Image (cartoon, rainbow, N blue to C red):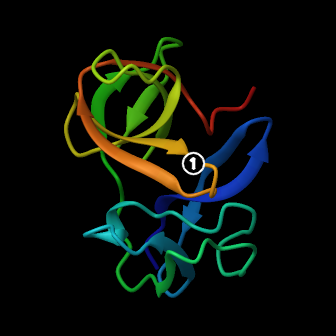
């Protein structure tokens, strides 16, 4: 079995996402409009991997068949913590006027997928290049 960095729901103040480990054969959840859900590893916002929780209707269940390790992209947040592909980070975007939103680090430095929770508890998604990584959401306080 290959472990992989993934995301599970864990309410921490206003933060709904944190990092965990996902393994081959486990269930996970992802927004149905993602082109490649295996690159995102999102699960139910108030459940854990393999449990239903309150999954938004637009999310689908999947089984992880071939988990792969996520690489470092050679960036650090303001605290000097290394940022890895798949990390959910606090992000200050200078391009679209979203301040301190959650963003997922993509395969190369400077490209992020931004998440902002809508009233329906579904994340709006936008790809943005540029901005500043403030901190990792999964980081221990």
Residue drawn at x 64%, y 68% as measured from the top left: 44
Q: Is residue 48 left or right of residue 105?
A: right
Circle 1: element type: loop
- The x and y percentages for residue 19 are 59, 50
Q: Is residue 44 left or right of residue 33?
A: right
- The x and y percentages for residue 126 are 32, 43
Compared to residue 85, the image places residue 75 above or below, namely above
Q: Residues within 10 Å of mark 1 (few under 14, many from 20)?
A: few
Residue drawn at x 34%, y 70% as measured from the top left: 33
Residue drawn at x 61%, y 71% as measured from the top left: 56
- The x and y percentages for residue 134 are 49, 18
Query: Total marks drawn?
Result: 1
Residue 73 found in image quarter: top left
Compared to residue 84, the image places residue 68 above or below, namely below
Residue drawn at x 75%, y 26% as measured from the top left: 141
Q: Work out whether residue 69 or residue 32 is closer to the camera in this orientation and state it.
A: 32
Compared to residue 97, the image places residue 30 above or below, namely below
- The x and y percentages for residue 10 are 74, 52
Q: Work out whether residue 101 or residue 138 is closer to the camera in this orientation and state it.
A: 101
Residue named by callout 1: 118
Q: Is residue 85 left or right of residue 78?
A: left
């Amino acid at each position: 079995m290959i472990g992989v960095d993934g995301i599970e729901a864990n309410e921490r103040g206003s933060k709904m996402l944190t990092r965990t480990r996902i393994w081959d054969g486990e269930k996970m959840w992802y927004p149905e409009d993602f082109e490649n859900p295996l690159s995102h590893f999102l699960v139910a916002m108030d459940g854990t991997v393999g449990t239903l929780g309150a999954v938004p209707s637009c999310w689908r269940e999947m089984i992880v068949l071939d988990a792969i390790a996520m690489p470092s992209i050679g960036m650090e947040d303001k605290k000097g913590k290394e940022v890895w592909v798949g990390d959910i980070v606090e992000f200050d975007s200078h391009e679209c006027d979203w301040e301190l939103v959650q963003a997922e680090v993509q395969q190369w430095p400077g490209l992020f997928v931004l998440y902002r929770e809508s009233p329906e508890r579904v994340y709006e998604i936008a790809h943005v290049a540029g901005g500043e990584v403030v901190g990792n959401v999964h980081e221990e306080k």
